[in-house]
Image (tube, rainbow, N blue to C red):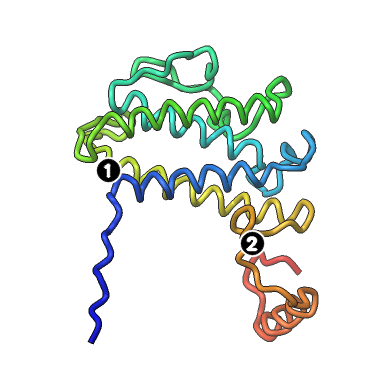
Amino acid sequence: MTTMPEATPPDPKTTLRRYLQGTRENLLWKLEGLSERDVRLPRTPTGTNLLGLVKHAAGTEIAYFGGTFSRPWPTPEDVPWLPLTPEAPWPDDPNVDFYATADESIADVVALYRKVWAFSDETIESLPLDAPGHVFWWGDGAVTLHQILVHVIVDLSRHAGHADILREGVDATVGMRQGNSNIPDGVDWPAHVARLRGIAEQFPAGPGSPA
């Protein structure tokens, strides 16, 4: 009997970085080909919009991979809306990081996020996974780099899922990532949706449900 060689598991940090980078790129991909208007339009009752998700992602990485590990963001003028220290005042608008202002273009927000990637990656590369940090807005706030990597990947993945749905609502573009939609081919989608609607409508609507 031939014994198959055991696979060598990848380094844990390498695995975490791969998932982090993939999620970053997937999120940016959801902006491609859209107009400034399309990426800014609020598409949920709470104002969720595509460009705002990317701006929020940039602020998230600055906060978690910066001050948490005593690495100040080098150009605070890029992010006047982001409290970078415990002493900094929180913005009057609690949603300020979830939308781009009229003078923040798609190119501006994307360039900021790519700059943030390099900053975050320096933190990840320079520290071991058990490196201690402190998240000042978490109360006690004691963390490790491993914990923060998992936290940020989960947070960004959730927002990438938001972006999936928003983009489908703009122009019916769907897909997990560029080059691999992860969506089955040959499906009659209108018929599929009609079938699901028919199943759902066999049940009574709940309070406040749309007609």
For label 2, the residue is 181
| Picture residue at 36% right of the left edge, 45% below the top | 151
Give how far across and how far down residue 71 sits, in percent.
33, 20
Classify 28 as above or below 187: above
Callout 2 environment at 10 Å: few (<14), some (14 to 19), or many (20+)?
few
Residue at the disc numbered 1 = 146
Q: Check disc 2 and report its element: helix, strand or loop.
A: loop
Q: Quadrant of residue 128?
A: top left
x and y, in percent, of residue 35 in the image: 79, 37
Amino acid at dot 2: Ser
User: Hey, which quadrant is residue 90 in on the image?
Assistant: top left
Quarter occupied by the C terminus: bottom right
Q: Nearer the viewer, residue 161 or 114?
A: 114
Label at residue 155: none
Residue at image location 28% in from the left, 49% down from the top:
12
126 lies left or right of 184: left
Location of residue 202 by image quarter = bottom right
Q: Earlier in the sequence, mark 2 or mark 1?
A: 1
Q: Does dot 1 land on a helix, a strand or a loop?
A: helix
**CA distance separating discs 2 and 1:** 30 Å
Q: At x 73% / y 23%, what residue is drawn?
A: 102
Vertical arrangement, residue 2 with respect to residue 65, above or below: below
- What type is the residue that disc 1 sits on? His
